[in-house]
Image: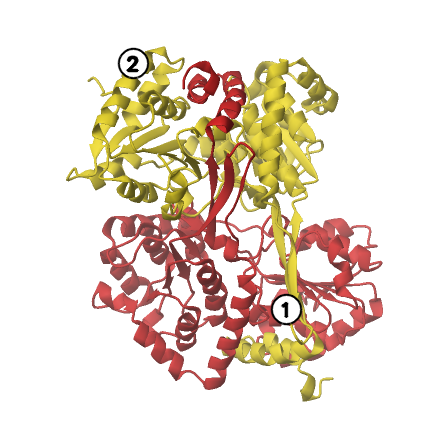
Chain colours: A yellow, B red
Amino acid sequence: MADSLIKRMSTSDADFDASLTSLLDWESVSNPAVVETVATVLAKVRADGDAALLDFTRKFDAWEPDAASSLEISSSRMQAALERIDVSVRAALETAADRIRTYHQHQSQDSWSYREADGTLLGQQITALDRVGLYVPGGKATYPSSVLMNAIPAKVAGVDELIMVSPTPKGYVNDMVLAAAAIAGVDRVFTVGGAQAIAALAYGTESIPKVDKIVGPGNIYVATAKRQVFGSVGLDMIAGPSEILVICDGKTDPDWIAMDLFSQAEHDEDAQSILLSPDVEFLNKVEASIARLLPTAERADIIRQSLSRRGALVCVKDIDEAIAVSNRIAPEHLELSVDNAEELLPKIRHAGAIFMGRYTPEALGDYCAGPNHVLPTSGTARFSSPLGVYDFQKRSSLIACSAAGASELAKVASILARGESLTAHAQSAEYRILDDGNE
Amino acid sequence: MADSLIKRMSTSDADFDASLTSLLDWESVSNPAVVETVATVLAKVRADGDAALLDFTRKFDAWEPDAASSLEISSSRMQAALERIDVSVRAALETAADRIRTYHQHQSQDSWSYREADGTLLGQQITALDRVGLYVPGGKATYPSSVLMNAIPAKVAGVDELIMVSPTPKGYVNDMVLAAAAIAGVDRVFTVGGAQAIAALAYGTESIPKVDKIVGPGNIYVATAKRQVFGSVGLDMIAGPSEILVICDGKTDPDWIAMDLFSQAEHDEDAQSILLSPDVEFLNKVEASIARLLPTAERADIIRQSLSRRGALVCVKDIDEAIAVSNRIAPEHLELSVDNAEELLPKIRHAGAIFMGRYTPEALGDYCAGPNHVLPTSGTARFSSPLGVYDFQKRSSLIACSAAGASELAKVASILARGESLTAHAQSAEYRILDDGNE
């Protein structure tokens, strides 16, 4: 059976709602065998520390660390990698890092407080996390951009110690990843990966310190391990397949839009690329561009599968209807390839990142525009946000009652506590009432 | 075997570290039978909607709704409850609500953006969640304060529709809870509870709309159901037992401190109350106060169990050492019953809420001071924050490149994308380079 290159749909189709639902359908299936393997790995590392780490590294990464100490990459090795990489690549990494840093500095939050007339102070104290773990996938698919995007917000937040872990299958270490770690200010790097690395970060071992939060993408074992340590350690989101929704008025070069769709589709077969346009002729042109450009693409097979299984070119009535569809999808990446994109912003309810105008393809945001490329997938933009400085800071409420303030509040608290039958709460409050003889 | 009233410890004990670790030890055990029951309930409600809700309500809550429509409580019934409750209770709820609203308004975040020299705009758009579900436990232990604490931040954030669910065992509806819902601005109330209510909120039924996030405490079935729907819907934290850490210089009335410890201990047998003081004589006095006051407490049995199993009076060298212990514990509630508590703030690394001075018992914060009483438990203050307005808002990154800005960024993105072998990313960027003939 020959799949079509990419689905064609229209909001005027009688079954559009059902077709869209089925197109979007995605549920991560947890594999019981993986869950069990991961549980075993976690328990072993928790019990045996470095010894278990060495064992699992031999077994899963096929190299033989001679001692736990050789799991750590020294800062001079990181520096050497930075000096070894191509000078243009180094400059690109540094430009990207600077822009990411500048953008994220706008996200920093400040402690605040206010004092009431009776002297009572209320507020919130913001502090950085003490220590954060960053997982970086190893092997062939290495993404230095991911190191920058995860590490820089943590350092901007003021995280004191940022620990990176990355598997080095057969001992292979990627220079670009080490260089990115050096540029981003990663404090320590360990060459461990998989569930065993997550266990080391969550519980600590003799050589790897326990962290407060773990961020960064990983394979099914890593994702499953993160789920299992959830609660004892903070986590970033566990991402589904990446997706883009492009809304175009029909006036952008169709080759550009086709390539924007490819840039999402080339990630993997589950990636999702959808184009909405009110201009059916334009959709035809994009389809022709796809057909013409696809054979030239380096990752043509992946793109073909992704587009035919999960992609769509959708004809809409007008741009307003396109935005309504977008708000239903809550896309990870939303590209508004139209004139005056900024005017549409107030109508956009949910999106991880919004790329505005014909000159803002997602790829610029993926690498160097400044905002984070770790974004909520699978419709979770309805309730979650891009990774940011706020993910590496936490808040403590501040309450300092004056004697007079406490006395008034205590009367209110006493009534409510007694209404909830919590009489020790009530008495603890009542002790602070000034005019009843307790003072 | 007679348990002691409360453990005595000292940081100078040789085994202090181990004793503290064992005192703090708490791990939520997931019960496979509960996990299975919950999975069945979720699947049934997802498949059968209202019909399943009616069935489970008959079975678990022992009352017979005549139709799905009778699961909803009308706003006139809420208003009637508000008018029926004692006038002093109503006034106390309204005072608390006003103070909670005022405090949380300080947490509102604004969208921001900046424009670079070449015209490129970067920023972040803040929007409220569309629809939020609030779980409120029913039956005997009803907590109107919890309705205020969960609902008000959502409404301050601008959440359009706030749906409350609460079981009504044998049809019993608590007036104070309904009154609190009316005061807090809850939009709709449904009398369903347990895992079936979580399923209704997560998936939607004919009569209960699907929400974007679920907040609020619940029993083991509710907590397990929340874990199982995680991912398709946002969640607040899943709380462990409540805890307080009091640091006292020895100059507060020992009865006050004893009652502050009781107010935590009365929640349940797993609640944890710990006092740190450098004054061993003071610790003796507090122990005597505990012995004298305990028999008078309404919930004496629970307090006795909680204090003897999980409580401790700990002698420390000085206040600085007390703070070091506190930073290790990362307590949910930290009470600084000392002079000049504000001066200690910069040293506090982790705490859900900080209660400063002798006139600020936790009970005031639980009900009416203004800050939220939903706080990170079990040491999770190391990486998480009180429930707040920020939990009901999300962010979208904004990127709008000028033609000139895109051209420069595209050169950087192209190098990095090719370094990661993502050539469609590179080409998508390269199309936007101005001086290569594409324009």
Residue shown at the point (84%, 70%) measured from the top left: B281
Question: Subunit of mark 2?
Answer: A
Q: Is residue A194 left or right of residue B2?
A: left
Q: Position of residue B211 (x, y in %)?
A: 36, 53
Residue lying furthest top: A296
Residue mark closest to the camera, 2 vs 1: 2
Q: Is residue A149 left or right of residue A376?
A: right
Residue shown at the point (58%, 50%) measured from the top left: B384
Above or below, comparing residue B26 to residue A171 in the picture: below
The Cα atoms of the two marked residues, 2 and 1, are separated by: 68 Å
Q: Secondary structure at mark 1?
A: helix
Above or below, comparing residue B222 to residue A439 in the picture: above
Image quadrant in which you'd find residue A299: top left
**Res. B150 visible in picture:** yes
Q: Which residue is mark 1?
A: B362
Q: Which residue is mark 2?
A: A292
Question: Subunit of mark 1?
Answer: B
As drawn, the label of residue B227 is none
**Res. A173 visible in picture:** no
Of A142 and A190, the residue lying toward us:
A142
Which part of the image, by quadrant, shows the N terminus of chain B? bottom right
Residue shown at the point (35%, 51%) measured from the top left: B202
- Kind of residue at disc 1: Glu
Q: Position of residue B359 (x, y in %)?
A: 70, 74
